[in-house]
Image (tube, grey):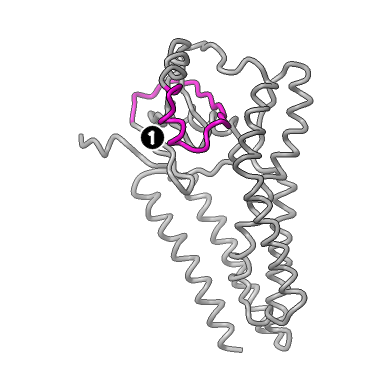
Amino acid sequence: MKESMNYETFTEAFAYYDRTAMQEYFEQKALEGWRLCKREMFSKWVFKRIEPQKLHYAITYLPQFANEDSFLLSESKKEYLEFCAEQGWQFACVYKNMVIFYNEEEDPVPFETDPEVELASIHKSMMKRFLPTCIVAFVISVAIILILLLTDISSKVTAIGLAVLLIAPLGNVAEFVSYLRWRKKALAAAATGKFSRSDTVDVLVVAVSIAVVIAAVVFVGVKSFMNNAWATLLYFSVFGVYFIFLHFIEKLEKRYNNGWKKKIISFVRFLGYFALLDCVNYISNMF
């Protein structure tokens, strides 16, 4: 068997602080015969093929390191990893300042023993990596919305273009606000000596962000076609069909998460996005 066939890349997005969901995902992959060995850009996780087994994963945050290289090149890395290995925790990979370990023992020694110390490390990492990005993203989002409301540029912007402009910055804001909401609950639990399960991005915060994007898209669409009811109806019908298409694609991606079927589904998603752009452009030219 070729060496490359022993590795597989899976795409799965997690909030940076959501250690619980990541650990559960890695442990499930181990039961399926895959062990984590690398994290790449765009939420890609590289796994090595193994015999299906039960593995325990632990994620720790080391805010004193700026990125992967600063950790891997540090003088203290070897001593730190050796200490963890003595406790049964083997190094899996590092991403930014998040270090991931796995353990083959049935009942491993807990990696973290003090919830308050763990929360302090997560908080420092979030402040260091996400606070500057969140501030910039918030300013960009507000600026885009104000420009649309106060100028006539909205009549020259397509709804899909607006969505693309807003989704990324609002996504960053949503993740950071969700983290702050979770941290408040986690601190209360830590005060009683309990570890708090981390949550993925808060549903309420995401819903507000999506609502802002949809409201902006509707505003642009109505303003662009306000003199033609049929154009407006057709315009938003296209988006409705596209959202149904995305829902169908997401179901397929959960069912086929690796191999050639996964690649075909990703390609179809890619084609669907450009089909949406073509439809929007065609409608704009028709009316």
Q: Residues within 10 Å of mark 1 (few under 14, many from 20)?
A: many
Task: Tell me if 148 is positioned left or right of 43 in this view.
Answer: right
In this rendering, the count of numbered labels is: 1
Give 93 or 6, whichever is nearer the viewer. 93
- The location of residue 70, given as percent across then percent down, is 46, 34
Task: Tell me if 269 is positioned left or right of 33 in this view.
Answer: right
- The location of residue 8, given as percent across then percent down, is 35, 39
- The location of residue 243, given as percent across then percent down, is 59, 62
- For badge 1, the amino acid type reads Phe
Q: Residue furthest front?
A: 75
Residue at coordinates 60% horizontally, 18% vertically from top-left? 112
Give 139 or 39, whichever is nearer the viewer. 139
Give 282 or 86, whichever is nearer the viewer. 86
- The location of residue 201, given as percent across then percent down, is 66, 43
- State which quadrant residue 170 falls in: bottom right
- The answer to whether residue 11 is magenta is no
Name the secondary structure under disc 1. strand
Give 125 or 232, whichever is nearer the viewer. 125
Residue at coordinates 63% horizontally, 38% vertically from top-left? 126
User: Which of the image's four quarters has the C terminus?
Assistant: bottom right
From which residue to which does the magenta span run?
Answer: 49-77
User: Which of the image's four quarters has the N terminus?
Assistant: top left
Residue at coordinates 47% horizontally, 16% vertically from top-left? 84
- The answer to whether residue 51 is magenta is yes
Q: Residue furthest left?
A: 1
The relative height of residue 76 versus residue 69 in the rendered view (above or below) is above
The relative height of residue 174 versus residue 162 in the rendered view (above or below) is above
The relative height of residue 224 versus residue 113 in the rendered view (above or below) is below
Residue at coordinates 66% horizontally, 35% vertically from top-left? 199
Mark 1 — residue? 47
Task: Tell me if 5 is positioned left or right of 181 in this view.
Answer: left
